[in-house]
Image: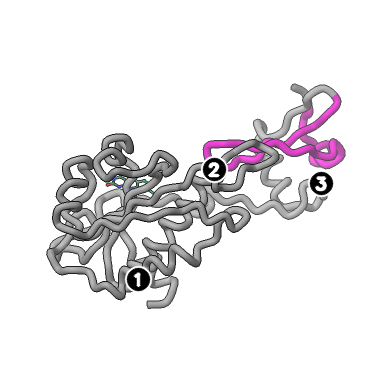
Amino acid sequence: MDFEEVIRTRYSVRKYSDRPVEDWKIDRILEAARLAPTGKNKQCQRIYVLRSPEAVRRIGDLCIMIFGAPVIMLVFAKRGESWISRFTGRDIAETDTSIVTDHMMLQATALGLGTCWVGYFDPKPICEAFGIPDDLALMHILPLGYAAEDCEPGPLHFQRKKVSEFATFLRSLLGADDLATDLLLGDPGAIRRLGDVVVLRLPLGDAAAFRYLDPDVAETRGHSLEP
Ligand SMILES: Cc1cc2nc3c(=O)[nH]c(=O)nc-3n(C[C@H](O)[C@H](O)[C@H](O)COP(=O)(O)O)c2cc1C
């Protein structure tokens, strides 16, 4: 499977067959977790692999999103081991462990296995049940195995935004010939004068970013800079 096929084939598998997962496939999936990039290469991920029928039954009692999978990866972050952004103070552990989980998910897909990323769980009882040390924070759960023959993607799988709904091409924020600026100037809400400063509001999904704009750019487009 090439990469394009992997990302197009993957969907959240919510019904698994009893077919056991081969050891070598688990090893390959863990190798993908090992090779994943992490902030400042801190590698804060810790992974518990649940495979014994007893452990799988136990996690199924504590998390309703296991879907009969024969193997469950519990993805933890070791507290204090991840990079902290000096700019925002943000702990990068969630990003690191998400990249690790995504690597495992895509590697599993490439090996013909199904997965479902699970974020719907209460970490406390799970950590207690498995005797997880206090310095590990449970971040994600990844059930995996062979999809049941009658398993199909859920309806949400087919609902994707168009690229134009979430991607914005910005070539030069200050250039009068800039395509993105032209497009944004077409949006009356996109440009504001804040005191002496003119800013562009950049639509970034549900969020927005603000950039300084050369007032001449707006004025040569005949755009009103009145607040
Ligand atoms: C961070 C994250 C958390 C998720 N948590 C759950 C979950 O708890 N239960 C579940 O059934 N699916 C969960 N999903 C799967 C998403 O619902 C699914 O990826 C999305 O609906 C698109 O469907 P698809 O994966 O089949 O393409 C989660 C996905 C992500 C990325």
- Nearer to the camera, 169 or 53: 53
Tag of residue 111: none
- On whether residue 220 falls in the magenta region, the answer is yes
Tell me the quadrant of the picture where the C terminus can be found.
top right
For marks 2 and 1, give the CA distance: 27 Å
Q: Please tell me which residue is depicted at 43% across the width and 67% down the height of the picture.
A: 32
Tag of residue 80: 2
At label 1, counting other C-alpha atoms closer than 10 Å, the crowd grade (few under 14, some 14-19, many 20 or more) is few
Amino acid of disc 1? Asp
* Label 3 sits on residue: 174
Q: Is mark 1 within 8 Å of ligand 1?
A: no
- Magenta range is 196-225
Q: Is residue 12 visible?
A: no
Residue 166 location (% of width, % of height): 53, 48
Left-right relation of 49 to 59? right
Left-right relation of 173 to 169? right
Decide: marks 2, 1 in contact (CB < 8 A)? no
Amino acid of disc 3? Leu
Amino acid of disc 2? Gly
Q: Earlier in the sequence, mark 2 or mark 1?
A: 1
Q: Is residue 10 visible?
A: yes
For marks 1 and 3, give the CA distance: 50 Å
Q: Mark 1 or 3, which is nearer the eye?
A: 1
Left-right relation of 33 to 148? right
For marks 3 and 2, give the CA distance: 41 Å
Using the rendered view, name the quadrant where residue 50 is placed.
Answer: bottom left
- On whether residue 163 falls in the magenta region, the answer is no
* Label 1 sits on residue: 27
At label 2, counting other C-alpha atoms closer than 10 Å, the crowd grade (few under 14, some 14-19, many 20 or more) is few
Q: Please tell me which residue is depicted at 33% across the width and 67% down the height of the picture.
A: 108
Q: Earlier in the sequence, mark 1 or mark 3?
A: 1
In this view, the residue farthest toward the bottom is 1
